[in-house]
Image (spheres, rainbow, N blue to C red):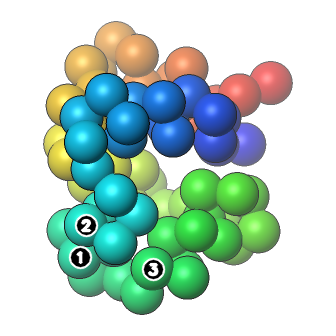
């Protein structure tokens, strides 16, 4: 499960909006919102693209995308 709060905090730190993130992923803003809110599944390539866009270090990947 995606840690929505953690990702939103990182987006604010990096000053990246959902619109801009959606553009980077090649998806609609609504789709990104649904994925970040665990309504639609997040695919690995999308999670990796989000990490790249938000400059999330590899060793923190699990904290953002595998919330327990």
The residue tagged 2 is 20
Q: Residue 29 at what x, y percent from top left? A: 45, 79
The residue tagged 1 is 23
Q: Nearer the viewer, residue 2 or 8?
A: 8
Identified at 50% across, 37% down, the residue is: 7
In-image side of 47 versus 54 (left or right)? right
Residue 22 versus residue 12 in the image, above or below: below
Q: Residue 26 at what x, y percent from top left? A: 26, 81
Q: Which mark is residue 61?
A: none
10 Å neighbourhood of mark 2: few (<14), some, or many (≥20)? few
* Mark 2 touches mark 1? (CB < 8 Å): yes
Q: Give the secondary structure at mark 2.
A: helix
The residue tagged 3 is 29
Identified at 38% across, 36% down, the residue is: 12
Q: Residue 23 at what x, y percent from top left? A: 23, 76
| Disc 2 from disc 1: Cα separation | 5 Å
């Amino acid at each position: 499960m995606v840690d929505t709060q953690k990702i939103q905090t990182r987006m604010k730190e990096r000053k990246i909006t959902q619109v801009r993130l959606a553009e980077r992923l090649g998806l609609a803003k609504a789709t990104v919102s649904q994925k970040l809110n665990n309504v639609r599944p997040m695919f690995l390539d999308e999670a990796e693209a989000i990490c790249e866009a938000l400059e999330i270090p590899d060793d923190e990947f699990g904290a953002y995308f595998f919330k327990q």
